[in-house]
Image: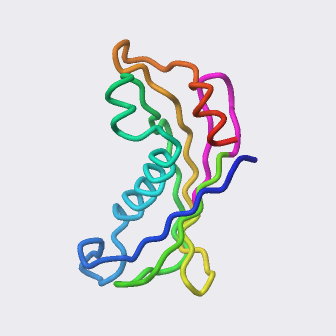
């Protein structure tokens, strides 16, 4: 298992659906915000992506919803790199945790690193591997 990255967020009105709870698409958006947060902190933010023409990408996502999330709730998103499946594919598990410590959602994703010029998967940059392991 790799490093655990933490990201805190408050659910806002624009994240809600007509039932008054977190919209299913907003879960994915908040999980992505958490990934961008640790990517930026590790030196792999948008500026790095654009200048190097390389980017981490999601290849597969599987999410489960466990507890309802309401407006203005504080959430902690924990992201952990689980390892490499092969030289081109790695996996992350992300958990969305409510302030009462209950897990609201779990997202398991397979990730790759894309060469944006060649439009194909490439080996993970060594510095990125160091950041997550």
Dividing the picture into quarters, in which one does residue 127 lie?
top right
Q: Is residue 97 magenta?
A: no
Residue at 53 percent of width and 71 percent of height:
76
Q: Measured from the top left, where is residue 114 in percent x and y?
A: 44, 24
Q: Please identify the quadrant where the C terminus is shown.
A: top right
Q: Measured from the top left, where is residue 65 in percent x and y?
A: 51, 69
Q: Measured from the top left, where is residue 106 in percent x and y?
A: 57, 62
Residue at 36 percent of width and 21 percent of height:
116
Left or right: 115 in relation to 42 = left
Task: Tell me which segment is drawn in magenta.
Answer: 82-94
Closer to the camera in the image, 16 or 12: 12
Closer to the camera in the image, 1 or 131: 131
All told, the count of numbered labels is 0
Q: Main secondary structure of the magenta part?
A: strand
With respect to residue 97, does 89 lie above or below? above
Residue at 29 percent of width and 82 percent of height:
19
- Residue reaching furthest right? 1
Q: Is residue 84 magenta?
A: yes
With respect to residue 42, does 115 lie above or below? above
Closer to the camera in the image, 124 or 109: 124
- Residue reaching furthest bottom? 100
Q: Measured from the top left, where is residue 45 in percent x and y?
A: 40, 41
Dividing the picture into quarters, in which one does residue 91 lie?
top right
Left or right: 57 in relation to 99 = left
Left or right: 10 in relation to 97 = left
- Residue reaching furthest top? 118
């Amino acid at each position: 298992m790799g490093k655990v990255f933490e990201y805190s967020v408050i659910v806002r009105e624009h994240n809600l659906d007509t039932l008054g709870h977190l919209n299913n698409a907003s879960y994915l958006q908040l999980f992505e915000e958490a990934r961008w947060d640790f990517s930026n902190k590790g030196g792999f933010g948008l500026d790095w992506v654009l200048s190097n023409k390389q980017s981490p990408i999601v290849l597969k996502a599987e999410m489960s919803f466990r507890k309802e999330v309401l407006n203005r709730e504080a959430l902690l998103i924990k992201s952990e790199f689980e390892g490499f499946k092969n030289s081109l594919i790695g996996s992350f598990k992300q958990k969305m945790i409510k302030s009462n410590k209950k897990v609201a959602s779990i997202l398991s994703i397979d990730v790759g690193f894309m060469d944006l010029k060649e439009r194909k998967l490439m080996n993970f940059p060594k510095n990125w591997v160091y950041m997550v392991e």
